[in-house]
Amino acid sequence: CNDAGVEFHHSKCATSFIRDVIAPVYVPELVNEFFSFDKTVSYQGHFKPIMAIQFTELPDGVFIGCSINHAVTDGTSFWNFFNTYAEICRKISNNDPSIEKISRQPEFSRDSRIFSFCREAILELKAKVNSNNKDKLLVNEDFNAFEKCYFDKSVNLNGIFENWLFKSSNIANTAEISSFQSLSALLWRAVTRARKLPVSKTTTFRMAVNCRHRLNPKLDPLYFGNAIQSIPTYAVAGDVTSRDLRWCAERLNESVEAHKDERVRGYLKEWEKDPRCFPLGNFDGASMTMGSSPRFPMYENDFGWGRPLAIRSGGANKFDGKISAFPGREGMGGVDLEVVLAPETMAAIESDPEFMQYVMN
């Protein structure tokens, strides 16, 4: 440890308002300036603090940017820390006598754009993936998430989609695909189509998975540290684009289900034999990486001013094909995906009917 502590910066931005941060369809470059360690690489943790907090005052609100070295902690630990930091600040401002007790005690024993998906759209997508009978498919091909979620308020959508899920999940000898895997498969297909890759080109879809519960014995859910691994799933572009959504989702599901204790430890043993830097990026033009998680308690960060209005990430670990998943602010199973793509690829998926029918913004 270099004993550099944690940097804290108090900044003021008099020319930009909340609307300038969260209203644009594309995430503005301004957001990167709210993070102290923007453009800092992991190795610089040997010389710089491993963490920095930047508190930026806007004319009509504040932005709290928290940067931490990913070699030290993963998303689970990061958001547990951020929630705890907010809880302590809130208790201090309220003179709360329970300041010494925190709710989630950590365990220390060892071009970017936001695409929003409402719960109904995700359930519809999951139902589609889990139905392998095209003749009896229980979904409407003309489904429009924006229209359903915002204009048809009188319809009991939750009941309709739950009924679809109940019926379509009753398939013998077939593993159920999760909502998140269904959403990932949708992205895999859309981006592969948009990139116009040769049919024989191998594509890669990586998913960052939490290994705490995959080990035997399991780690504590609040184990503080970096306990994630990146799981690759491979398929040629021709298969990704010509086969159906379920086929892609099944490939992702198989990769995740196979990643258990033996494989987790095997990855570590192989790395010890042959240490190497993780190949972050899209070097072959056919890769995608899904990071973060809609399960992280991002909107529970109440510093005493109420819940956050929005979640945005900075420029770290961003490249063509990087996707970051956030929970929707309203909860109820909604998901926001921060997607970074080359301009021509982004333009193509924005006009992809299979993809955009589920997007609500």
Image: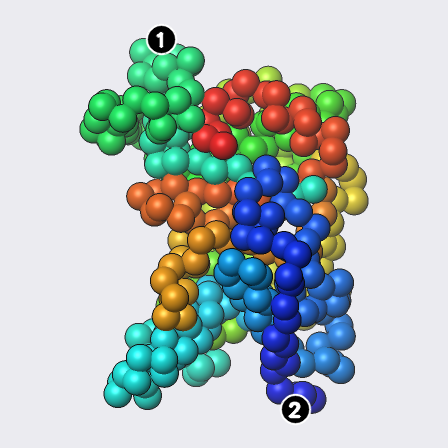
Query: What residue is drawn where x is 74% and y is 29%?
Result: 344
Which mark's residue is nearer the viewer, 2 or 1? 2
Figure check: 316 above or below 338: below
From the viewer's side, name the closer residue of 34 and 264. 34
From the viewer's side, name the closer residue of 312 and 273. 312
Callout 2, which amino acid? Answer: Asp
Residue 112 visible = yes
> Where residue 280 appears, x then y in whole percent?
72, 54
Q: In 3D space, how far apart are the residues under numbered discs 2 and 1 (Cα atoms)? A: 64 Å
Residue underneath mark 1: 135
Residue underneath mark 2: 3
From the viewer's side, name the closer residue of 110 and 86. 86
Tell me the quadrant of the picture where the N terminus can be found: bottom right
- Quarter of image, res 35: bottom right
> Where residue 183 appears, x then y in whole percent?
47, 35
- Quarter of image, res 313: bottom right
Residue 215 visible = no
Q: For residue 43, which numbered disc appears in the image?
A: none
Query: What residue is drawn where x is 50% and y is 54%?
Result: 311
